[in-house]
Image (cartoon, rainbow, N blue to C red):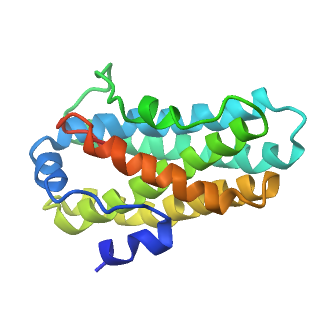
């Protein structure tokens, strides 16, 4: 089963707590809304990195392509929200991403490397949870949608790791530290129906 291979394949330090899935299924509309915001934020983060590091030509094209793909996913989530009669709007954000960013070093190039690795871990966690949802959902269209996202989330994870490695060959070791921090962040997250709590 997929969760058994998550740690070695996606570099997660710990699997999702079993209590997450029933909470997510019970608050599925909230999770979908959170997912839409997460896809929008992922596109924004990729573009922000392009603007912040214009001298890094090696980042520009892959992050531009990633941003377009994330916006496509955002639009797909919007379609599922509409199908369920749920409007897109503001939502109290989970503290997950902010707390994850606390591990980012302040000096360059460590700041860029750690930011890329945080993005890698977020993509990995999304991939793991999309698989859990795909296996558990009664809504066949939504289950198929989540199954369809698995390859791209895993690819995004790998892309961020490779971009970080291109800046610092020691990035895979640093990734272990970031992943361990992310696992701790999840244990302290509020029990809200969100993609990353």
Q: Residue at x 88, y 43 (%)?
A: 57
Location of residue 12 by image quarter = bottom left
Vertical order, 68 against 142 (above or below): above
The residue at the far bottom in this view is 1
Horizontal arrangement in the rendering, residue 32 relative to residue 113 (left or right): left
Q: Which of 84 and 196 is in front in this view?
A: 196
- Would you say 28 lies left or right of 82 here? left
Total numbered badges shown on the rendered structure: 0
Q: Position of residue 80 (x, y in %)?
A: 30, 44
Position in image of residue 127 (x %, y %): 41, 60
In the picture, the quarter occupied by the N terminus is: bottom left
Up the image or down, 148 lies above or below 34; here it is below
**Vertical placement of residue 84 versus 13, above or below:** above
The residue lying at 65 percent from left, 53 percent from top is 160
Q: Which image quarter: residue 47? A: top right
Q: On the rendered structure, is 140 left or right of 144?
A: left
Q: Where is residue 132 in the image (x, y as percent from the top left)?
A: 26, 63
Q: Please name whichever residue, 153 or 11, is drawn nearer the observer in this view of the structure.
A: 11
Inspect this view and state whether residue 129 appears: yes
Say which quadrant the C terminus sits in.
top left
């Amino acid at each position: 089963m997929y969760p058994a291979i998550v740690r070695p394949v996606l570099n997660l330090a710990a699997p999702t707590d079993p209590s997450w899935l029933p909470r997510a299924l019970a608050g599925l509309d909230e999770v979908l809304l959170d997912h839409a915001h997460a896809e929008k934020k992922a596109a924004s983060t990729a573009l922000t990195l392009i603007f912040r590091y214009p001298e890094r030509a090696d980042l520009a094209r892959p992050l531009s392509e990633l941003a377009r793909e994330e916006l496509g996913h955002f639009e797909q989530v919007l379609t599922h929200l509409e199908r369920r009669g749920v409007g897109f709007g503001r939502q109290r954000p989970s503290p997950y991403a902010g707390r994850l960013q606390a591990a980012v070093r302040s000096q360059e190039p460590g700041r860029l490397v750690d930011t890329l690795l945080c993005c890698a871990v977020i993509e990995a966690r999304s991939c793991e949870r999309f698989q859990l949802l795909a296996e558990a959902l009664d809504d066949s269209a939504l289950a198929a949608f989540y199954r369809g996202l698995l390859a791209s989330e895993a690819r995004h994870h790998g892309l961020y790791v490779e971009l970080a490695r291109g800046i610092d060959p020691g990035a895979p070791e640093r990734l272990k530290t970031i992943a361990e921090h992310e696992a701790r962040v999840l244990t302290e997250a509020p029990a809200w129906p969100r993609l990353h709590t």
